Image: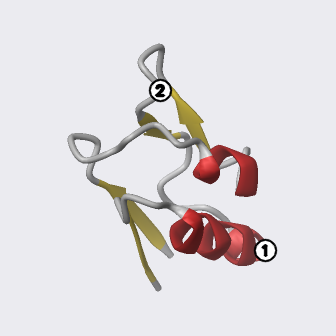
Amino acid sequence: MKITTDRERCIGAGQCVLNAPGVFDQDDEGTVIVLDDHPSPEEEPTVRAAEHACPARVISVVT
């Protein structure tokens, strides 16, 4: 699994962090930061939940 984000379109809703706090964080401006762009297979359900919860649709997950 590989994660990419479009930080320029991020609106700082924080749904990614709420769903997958071990994979995502936010900078001082609230913009998404990927802590681990190749998380373990066990984290896939939470990463997928974060992808679907993002209101700006800036998270892409490829398996």
Depth check, front residue: 55 or 63:
55
Q: Secondary structure at mark 2?
A: loop
Callout 2: few (<14), some (14-19), or many (20+) C-alpha neighbours within 10 Å?
few
Q: Are marks 2 and 1 in contact (CB under 8 Å)?
A: no
How much space separates mark 2 and mark 1, taking CA atoms? Answer: 26 Å
Q: Which residue is label 1 attached to?
A: 42
For the point 47% across and 26% down, the residue is 30
Residue 29 x, y percent position in the rendering: 41, 18
Image coords of residue 39 (percent x, y):
61, 62
Q: Which residue appears at 26% of the width and 51% of the height? A: 6
Horizontal and vertical percent position of residue 10: 34, 44
Closer to the camera in the image, 53 or 42: 53
Which of marks 1 and 2 precedes in the sequence? 2
- Check the image and name the residue furthest to the left: 8
Looking at the rendered image, the disc whose residue lies closer to the viewer, 2 or 1, is 2
Q: Identify whether 49 is placed above or below 26.
A: below
Farthest residue, direction top? 28
Q: Residue at x 60, y 52 (%)?
A: 16
Q: Label 2 is placed on what type of residue? A: Gly
Q: Look at mark 2 in the image and give the residue it sits on.
A: 30
Horizontal and vertical percent position of residue 27: 47, 22
Q: Secondary structure at mark 1?
A: helix
Relative to 3, is 36 on the left or the right? right
Q: Quadrant of residue 7?
A: top left
- Decide: few, some or many residues near mark 1? Use Cα within 10 Å; few <14, some 14-19, many ≥20: few
Seen in the picture, residue 22 relative to 52 is either above or below; the reply is above
> Above or below — where is 54 with respect to 23?
below
The amino acid type of the residue labelled 1 equals Glu
